[in-house]
Image: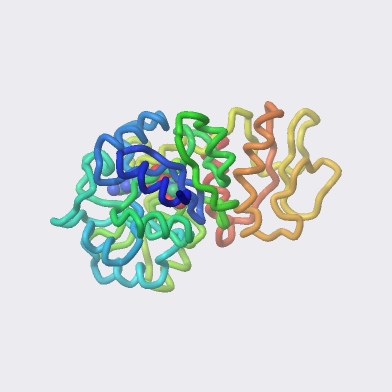
Amino acid sequence: MTNCTAAIELLSVGELIGLPTETVYGLAADATNADAVAKIFALKKRPQFNPLIAHVGSMDMAAAQADFSGKAQQLAEVFWPGPFTMVLPKSASNTICDLARAGLETQALRFPAHPVAQEVIAAFGKPIAAPSANISGYVSPTSAQHVRDEFGANLPLVLDGGSARIGLESTVVAVLNDEVTLLRPGSVSKDDIEAVVGKIGTSLHDDNAPKSPGMLSRHYSPEARLRLNITSPEADEAYIGFGPVAATTTLSLSETGDLTEAASNLYAMIRELDLTYDAIAVAPIPEVGIGAAINDRLRRAAL
Ligand code: TXA
Ligand code: MG
């Protein structure tokens, strides 16, 4: 039996699996099965007011679950499959359980590009709910080993799709009344989106009225104390550098100063240093392109 077959059998009986995507690994369940989705919230210790993304394997599967306005259609054509999630009005034919939406009338959908994710969703034939496969609030996993470290024997199967190519969670936008609002920055940048649909709004986190509850301020956090924009670390701190390695550098996100490489290394390096250090200092990261998403995650991790 291939791993994919085993994955489908587990999903079919309402069990969870670890699923690779190009952004981060997901903790996956049948999105239409409320009992299965409840296991995601329990295993992650995730508050039930925080809705999940449903992953689809085709435009047809997406269109059955949510209403696509003109702009939503355009964005899907450009950014799907890929690291891009849209929050849309749920359709009349939606079959995803209310719990996955945390009772909202809107549905978050993503069509991932990772071949293993695509194979599993196509074979399963239904949307798959999957938040990042970490205990709520901790650093997202970018390898199968990270997921095993997180859940151990409580997760029957983790499909290994290699190191996540992007390494940061997907960009999340809401497309409601044909207006586009950025809810979570990611590797698809605001400029990339505006090149397709013109000016968009931004509504990043507000703890009192979270539009995207996963944007609650503290998130993505290691146990270690994290300090940002540091050029001279303290003696007892691990130092995550960016650019050429200095005498103080413990690990460099990218020795050549490549932001894409830095994003793909960020979570693995934080996880590794969190095992042995009580304090981590991080070099300044340019607020350009995916650098904006890296800084967004670092700010939340440091709270
Ligand atoms: O890259 C990713 O997006 C990964 C992979 C596994 O797909 N998933 C991920 O899921 O990061 P999660 O649950 O960690 O983050 C999903 C975000 C949360 O901030 C959640 O609040 C938001 O999407 N979200 C989901 N449904 C929503 C809705 N109906 N309205 C507003 N925000 C929503
Ligand atoms: Mg998450």
Image spot of residue 222 (x, y percent): 58, 33
Relative side of 28 to 267, left or right: left
Query: Which picture quadrant has residue 299?
Result: top right
At a point 34% along the width and 58% down the height, the residue shown is 56
**How many numbered marks appear?**
0
Q: Tell me how the rendering is colored.
A: rainbow
> Compared with residue 92, is residue 279 higher up or lower down, i.e. above or below?
above
| Residue 258 seen anywhere in this rendered image of the structure | yes
Query: Which picture quadrant has residue 232?
Result: top right
Image spot of residue 62 (x, y percent): 28, 61
Quadrant observed for ligand 2 in the rendered image? top left
| Residue 173 seen anywhere in this rendered image of the structure | no
Relative side of 74 to 296, left or right: left
At a point 40% along the width and 66% down the height, the residue shown is 80
Image spot of residue 248 (x, y percent): 82, 41
The residue nearer to you, when weighing 198 against 270, is: 270
> Compared with residue 182, is residue 209 higher up or lower down, i.e. above or below?
above
Q: Residue furthest right?
A: 247
At a point 50% along the width and 47% down the height, the residue shown is 159
Image spot of residue 234 (x, y percent): 77, 32
Q: Residue furthest front?
A: 1
The residue nearer to you, when weighing 99 against 68, is: 99
The residue nearer to you, when weighing 141 against 4, is: 4
At a point 26% along the width and 71% down the height, the residue shown is 70
